[in-house]
Image: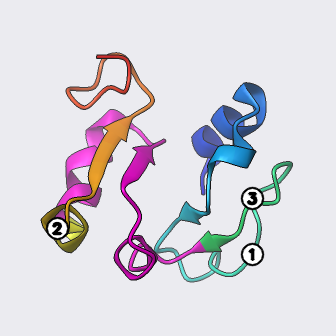
């Protein structure tokens, strides 16, 4: 639920397509993303809510760290894609 996610969701106007924002920072959880007012939940909810697609809205250098912490999501068939063209997981490919 960092500034990149906030900017992407609000500038692109896609809040109605998103169930929630995942963030494992305890201080951010159970609050709301500014502007879009999407709930911020722990990443474990990706599995619990059977989410199919998670958009990565963070620095490309941190993508693999987040993915490594959420292997169960991918094991259940979930897919991580990045909002950045330069990422190997880019949504634009």
Q: Is residue 42 magenta?
A: yes
Direction from residue 16 to residue 61 in the image, left or right? left
Number of marks present in the image shown: 3
Q: Which region is colored magenta? A: 41-68
Callouts 2 and 3 close, C-beta under 8 Å: no
How far apart marks 2 and 3 lie (CA) works out to 25 Å
The quarter of the picture where the C terminus appears is top left
Eyeballing the image, is 47 above or below 62? below
Q: Residue at x 61, y 61 (%)?
A: 19
Which residue is more in the foreground, 87 or 44?
A: 44
Q: Secondary structure at mark 3?
A: loop
Callouts 2 and 1 close, C-beta under 8 Å: no
**Residue designated by label 1:** 31
How far apart marks 3 and 1 lie (CA) works out to 7 Å
**Residue designated by label 2:** 71
The quarter of the picture where the N terminus appears is bottom right
Image location of residue 3, percent across then percent down: 65, 44
Which residue is more in the foreground, 34 or 52?
A: 52
Looking at the rendered structure, which numbered label has been put on residue 33? 3
Graded by Cα atoms within 10 Å as few (under 14), some (14 to 19) or many (20 or more), the crowding at tag 2 reads few
Sequence-wise, the earlier of marks 2 and 1 is 1
How far apart marks 2 and 1 lie (CA) works out to 25 Å
Which residue is more in the foreground, 9 or 4?
A: 9
Q: Residue at x 23, y 57 (%)?
A: 67
Eyeballing the image, is 42 above or below 66? below
Q: Residue at x 30, y 17 (%)?
A: 86
Q: Secondary structure at mark 2?
A: helix
Q: Is residue 48 magenta?
A: yes
Image location of residue 11, percent across then percent down: 75, 27
């Amino acid at each position: 639920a960092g500034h990149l996610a906030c900017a992407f969701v609000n500038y692109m106007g896609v809040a109605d397509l998103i169930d929630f924002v995942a963030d494992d920072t305890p201080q951010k959880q159970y609050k709301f993303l500014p502007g879009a007012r999407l709930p911020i939940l722990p990443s474990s909810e990706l599995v619990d809510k059977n989410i199919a697609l998670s958009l990565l809205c963070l620095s490309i250098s941190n993508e693999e760290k987040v993915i490594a912490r959420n292997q169960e999501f991918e094991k259940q068939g979930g897919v991580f894609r990045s909002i950045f063209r330069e990422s190997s997981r880019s949504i634009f490919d």
